[in-house]
Image: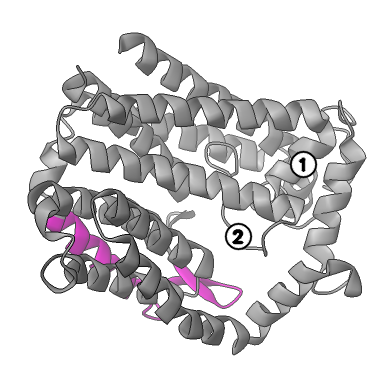
Amino acid sequence: MRRLRVSLFITTVILICLGIVMIYSSSAILSYEKYRDSAFFLKRQSLFFMLGMVALFFVVATDYRILKKFSKLILVSSLFLLVLVLIPGIGYSVFGARRWFRFFGFSFQPSELALLSMVIYLASFLSQKNKDIKNFFSGLLSPLLITAVFFFLILLQPDLGTAFLIGGTSLLILYVGGAKLSHILSLCLLSLPFIYLIIFTVPYRALRITAFLNPWLDPRGAGFQIVQSQIALGSGGVFGLGLGRGKQKLFFLPANHTDFIFSNIGEELGLMGVSFVLILFLIILICGFKIIKECSESFGFYLGLGIISIILLKAIIHMGVGVGLLPTKGLPLPFISYGGSSFLFDLIGIGILLNISKNSCV
């Protein structure tokens, strides 16, 4: 198992190093234009990296099973922060979205903590009430209601991408935990009218869907991001234009160091660079599944499954948006995109996986 832990850690570090290089490449011009410092985002991401590594090693050194004891406290604390961030004057608003707390020039996004806290709670719940989960009212209903509360609070920010991520991850864990497929499918079918309402009654969300279906109908408006992302990926070819030589970062592709960094990788490093990223995430997936497969107790199994699901779903959605297979969601690419909260909690997740391997795997 030690070799597995080393592989997981080294793969994560390689992704982070690639991310730091690509963040600098994609943001240097923007940084200089906005802050008169071409290394502004590079410096901040390097700081996030150091803080994240401290958090990772702390988590590795602390038995993960303590999280089971405090799962409800972590859940309630996360719920409180999700409510607090919605209050004007407390939550920090950007372009109409109130998703962050702002401290000393740095932002904290409580929805990232909510993702982890929900996984911890569900892992604790299933490890104690696994036999009841097949019964809808006595077993499944309770975690579904809690998931729904978190879903709505995140939706109010508004952050549809993270709301769907927390809902999808929760359903996956509950299904693996023994929930009947008929219950899960029935719930999904019943939720379709609600999903339709929250998307198509909000103009900018409806516009994203129409732009996703055919971005070339409005290439300078609603379809602009998708079109520019596809241009970036297509112009990279097999080997890319070369590191630092991408054109879309010249204020064509918005958020190319965050929401569309995968497209920037494709433009500058080509198919080879994109394939390398995919292989690294595949290694994380394989290592993660090997760890939970060998886990000797159920809490660690479900906790590890939830963490793997969050990281991989984020990556799939981010890449899917980049290539035009999914509507724009605004989710970062784990370990690579610029950002503090998501980056920190993804590293904490890796730390928990390493801890599970260290303490519970045979």
Look at the picture and state if 96 lies above or below 248: below
- SS at badge 2: loop
Give the left or right position of residue 296, taking residue 251 as reference: left
Furthest residue to the front?
Answer: 182
Tell me the magenta residue range: 72-99
**Residue 67 versus residue 224 in the image, above or below:** above
Q: Nearer the viewer, residue 279 or 332?
A: 279
Residue 186 seen: yes
Total residue callouts: 2
Q: Residues within 10 Å of mark 2 (few under 14, many from 20)?
A: some
Q: Quadrant of the N terminus?
A: top left
Q: Quadrant of the C terminus?
A: top left
In the image, residue 162 lies at what x, y percent?
Answer: 47, 62
Q: Which residue is mark 2?
A: 330
Tell me the amino acid under the disc marked 2. Gly
**186 relative to 158 in the view: left or right:** left
Cβ atoms at labels 1 and 2 below 8 Å apart: no
What residue type is disc 1 on? Asn
| CA gap, disc 1 and disc 2 | 15 Å
What's the mark number on residue 97? none
In the rendered image of this protein, does residue 264 appear above or below residue 7? below
Picture quadrant of residue 140? bottom left
Q: Nearer the viewer, residue 123 or 350?
A: 123
Residue at screen point 86% across, 25% down: 239
Q: Position of residue 43 (x, y in %)?
A: 59, 35
List x then y, in percent, for residue 7: 44, 16
Q: Label 1, on which residue?
A: 264
Q: Earlier in the sequence, mark 1 or mark 2?
A: 1
Relative image position of residue 173 (x, y in whole percent): 31, 51
Residue 131, compared with residue 60, is above or below; it is below
Camera sees residue 251:
no
Tell me the crowding category of disc 1: few under 14, some 14 to 19, or many 20 or more residues within 10 angstroms, Cα based.
Answer: many
